[in-house]
Amino acid sequence: MTHPLVIIIVSAVVGIILLIGLTAVIKRFDAWLRQREAPISLLRWPPVVKDVGHNAIEVIAFGNARWDQIPTLMLGGFFVVAILLSFPVPGQSTVFVAAKIGLVSIFLIASLVAAVWMRSRHTYYRIDLSTGQVQRQRKTLGRPEKLKNYLLQLPVRAGSDCQSKDEDRKDATMQYSTCWTLKDGRKLTIVHKDEDEAQQFRAALAEHGCPITNASLTVDK
C-alpha cells in the first residue's frame, strides 16, 4: 500500500467517490436554501425578477457568473493537494503526518469559506419603471453594504447586447448579459451563465413591464 502508484489510484478513486457524493449533498441542501430564500448559497442561483408594486420591480442577482468556475477550481485544487500530501515520506514522524493532515484541513476549510463567500454576494436592484430610479444594494452572507442610487435613461428598457464596440475592450464573459443604460452613459449589467438563463431572465423582465431591446447599449468609458 505504500507504492506511489497504488496511493495515486486509491486516492483518486476515493476522491472521485467523495466528490460525487458531496456534489449530490450540496445540490440537495442548496435547493433547500433556495426554497427558503436564504442569504447564503452553495451554488449560484439564476437571477430573478419580482414585482414590488407601484410600477417597480426588484431584480436579484445571486452571485457573479464571472466567478462561476472559481469555487469548483478551488475545491478541485484541494483534492490535488490532498493526493500529493498523501504520499509517504521515508522516516516521517507522527508530528509530520499530523502537520500534513492539518495543512489539508486548513486548505479545505479555506476553500469552502471562499466558495460560500463568492456564491453569497447577492445584489439587489429596485427599479422604478416610471422614473428610472434604481437602488442597488449588495449583501454578502446576508450582511447589507452601502445603498447606491442610479438614474436610468427613459423609457426604461433592458438591452441584450451589452458588448463594447471597441475590439480591445470586448469581454468574453459579456456574451450572455442583460444591461440598462444610465443617464450618464454607463450601464448596469447582469452577466448570465448561458443563453438559456439569459432568455428566461429577459422573458421575466418583459412580463414585469420592462421591455427588451436588441440595440447595443452605451458602455463604460
Image: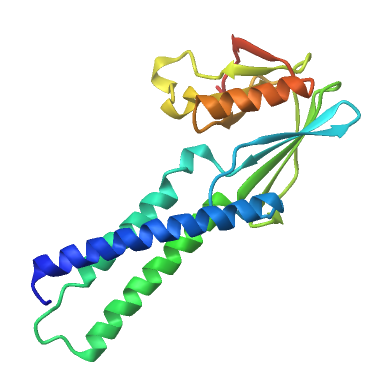
Residue lying furthest top in this view? Answer: 215
**In which quadrant is the C terminus drawn?**
top right
User: Is 11 placed above or below 191 here?
Assistant: below
Colour pattern: rainbow
Relative to 80, is 20 on the left or the right? right
Q: Is residue 187 visible?
A: no
State how many labels appear: 0
Residue lying furthest right in this view? Answer: 54
Quarter of the view holding residue 5: bottom left
Q: Residue at position x 65%, y 23% from top?
A: 202
Residue placed most toward the observer, 137 or 34: 34
Residue lying furthest bottom in this view? Answer: 94
User: Is 106 placed above or below 67 here?
Assistant: below
User: Is 145 placed above or below 3 here?
Assistant: above
Relative to 204, is 17 on the left or the right? left
Relative to 124, is 74 on the left or the right? left
Quarter of the view holding residue 7: bottom left
Indicate the position of residue 14 as horizontal and vertical percent values.
Answer: 28, 65
Residue placed most toward the observer, 24 or 71: 24
User: Is 184 placed above or below 69 here?
Assistant: above
Q: Is residue 199 visible?
A: yes
Q: Residue at position x 45%, y 29% from top?
A: 173
Quarter of the view holding residue 137: top right
Relative to 179, is 135 on the left or the right? right
Q: Residue at position x 26%, y 60% from top?
A: 80
Indicate the position of residue 176 as horizontal and vertical percent values.
Answer: 51, 25
**In which quadrant is the N terminus drawn?**
bottom left
Q: Residue at position x 47%, y 43% from top?
A: 67
